Image: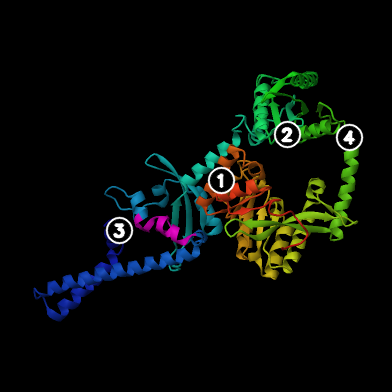
Amino acid sequence: MNCFFDTIKSNFAHISIVTLLSVIIIIILYGTNTNIYIMIALFTILALYWALQVKHNRLEKKVNTIHLADPNYNKNQNQIALNSHYATIDNQFNITYFNQLFLKEHALENKSLLGKSLFKILDIDPKNVLKELKDKGNFNGIIESTHNNIRKYQSLTIQPTSNHSKKEYFIIYHDVTDSLKTDQELKEQFLIDKFTGLSTKSKLMDDIERTPKPSIYSNTLIYISIDSFDEINEYFGLDAGNKILSYVANWLKKELPTKEAKLYKLDLDNFAIFTTQRLSMPALNEYLKRISAHIGKENFYFEGTALNLSFTLGAARCKTDIVKCTYLALKDAQNLKKSYKIYNKSCQHDERFIKNIKMNQTIKDAISENRVVPFFQPIYNLKTDKIEKYESLIRIQTKDDGYLGPIEFLEIAKRSKLYLELSQSMIKSSFEKLEDSNFPITINLTAEDILDKKVSNFILRRLNSMGNGNFITFEIVESEKIDNQLKVSNFIKKVKNFGCKVAIDDFGSGYSNFEQILKLDVDFLKIDGSLIKNIDTNKDSEIMTKSIVSFAKEMGIQTIAEYVSNEAIFNKVKLLGIDYAQGYHIGKPTNHLGI
């Protein structure tokens, strides 16, 4: 009823003019006969009906226009039509029309919504919205608002209407509060290792990033690896391994080097200790020596069998690159079969240096001689029980017709500034293979690839010339490193115009990439292998994977499980409702595309 009276008010000028003209015409023709006033009333009713019909037709046209203009609408037309709030606003951002959902949400007691400021009704800061409207001509994003003291989040789209005679906008939004709550819950899951109760690697990286760089004394980071842990798991089973991790976590809590030192659980059998309190080189050396000796004296019993544990430790006292330095120290200790190693800048690591120089030349030669080639690993559709597509994986073909895997050259390529050339060569080879096949493929891209004009323009040119973009999915790896959201989002829109799809790799490996999902228009989430590889025996992995699958389904995104290495894992991921499976159980990578 409010909408009815608001429409009358908004068309008052039309009604008044028509009524006045009707009165003048009737008086001229018939004089002031009393019965004529009945005719006037009828004319007035007709005029009112005409005004309302015109308004209805205009609004219907606007709704159809926004349905075509809004990319989010086309993604799930029926759902948005039923669950979204619609309104039109003038160039001053004042409400000129609203639908019933909008009215129900924002009704003002004894007051009309018409003519009210959109920003005041939604209770949002207009600064960011106005800037994007000015720069791009429209707005698409997540807004935060407060209604009845309840904080809510809405996906808001503001688009110009098709009415060129005056500047108007059509707005559509729907509530995504529950999705963001799920996002926050998932973040918390990945900050804490549920089995040991320790903070995870994600939290360690966050703590290091937030710690001010020391001006005089260095921070200290220690990596701790349990020796022969794989053998214990293999012989005694995963239950023994999990109990050992819990035991070691509790033991290390009592053996921290300083009062404020923090203990973290990393991947598999690794722990870390981080402290910002000054720890001298002699003190650090003494600490590493002491815990190496003490853990060897501890006896851990599993089902009546005594297991002796030992550690390999790497440590670094650095003002910068502390994670890298600690990792190098741990690797040196493992390679040298020593209990521990402290990173020392004066060590040249001659053997490693020479090896890197040789590999650097191997990469250059492979690029120039077109020996950067793709291997293809099948991706299995768990709904249709068929291999549906293949992931393109980088290899270097050696001069003796062997192949090098990415673990042997990829990091060296990144450090030696050869990565972008290597990546473009790989993308080119993948496109060429696709031309001779009818199987869809997935091509890996980093944010660095997308942000590099040469690489991204090369991709767009090839898509334009090939005309088979619907056979390609671009999988964004290292998504936590995306630092230019707008450019990545624009690239995604461009490749999607060619029919391509987009996936996020290693989803669940940290918490930062959860925020990308509501901002990037992705079609697939590839669940991180660290969750999948033990999902048939690890309840925590199963719970977290269920959360990701539920989150993805709510967002209308399909899921892929990687590292599906045996039938038990295959059956579990299928039971959990994951859409696709990939791993050695499905097929190993080969240089042939197709069955």
Q: Can the viewer see residue 282?
A: yes
Q: Earlier in the sequence, mark 2 or mark 4?
A: 2
Q: Position of residue 146 (x, y in %)?
A: 42, 42
Q: Residues within 10 Å of mark 2 (few under 14, many from 20)?
A: few
Q: Earlier in the sequence, mark 4 or mark 1?
A: 4
Q: Residues within 10 Å of mark 4 (few under 14, many from 20)?
A: few
For label 2, the residue is 235
Check disc 3 and give the amino acid type.
Cys
In this view, 356 is above or below 420: above
Q: Position of residue 122 (x, y in %)?
A: 41, 48
Q: Quadrant of residue 415?
A: top right
User: Mark 1 and 2 residues: CB-CB less than 8 Å, in contact?
Assistant: no
Label 4 element class: loop
Label 2 element class: helix
> 218 or 117: which is nearer to us?
218
> 531 or 157: which is nearer to us?
531
Check disc 4 and give the amino acid type.
Gln
For label 3, the residue is 3
**Can you say which quadrant of the picture contains the C terminus?**
bottom right
Label 3 element class: helix
> 512 or 24: which is nearer to us?
512
Q: Spatial distance from mark 2 to mark 4, Cα to Cα?
A: 39 Å
User: Mark 4 and 3 residues: CB-CB less than 8 Å, in contact?
Assistant: no
Q: Which stretch did the figure color magenta?
A: 76-100
Q: Quadrant of residue 280?
A: top right
Which is closer to the viewer, label 4 or label 3? 4
Check disc 1 and give the amino acid type.
Ile
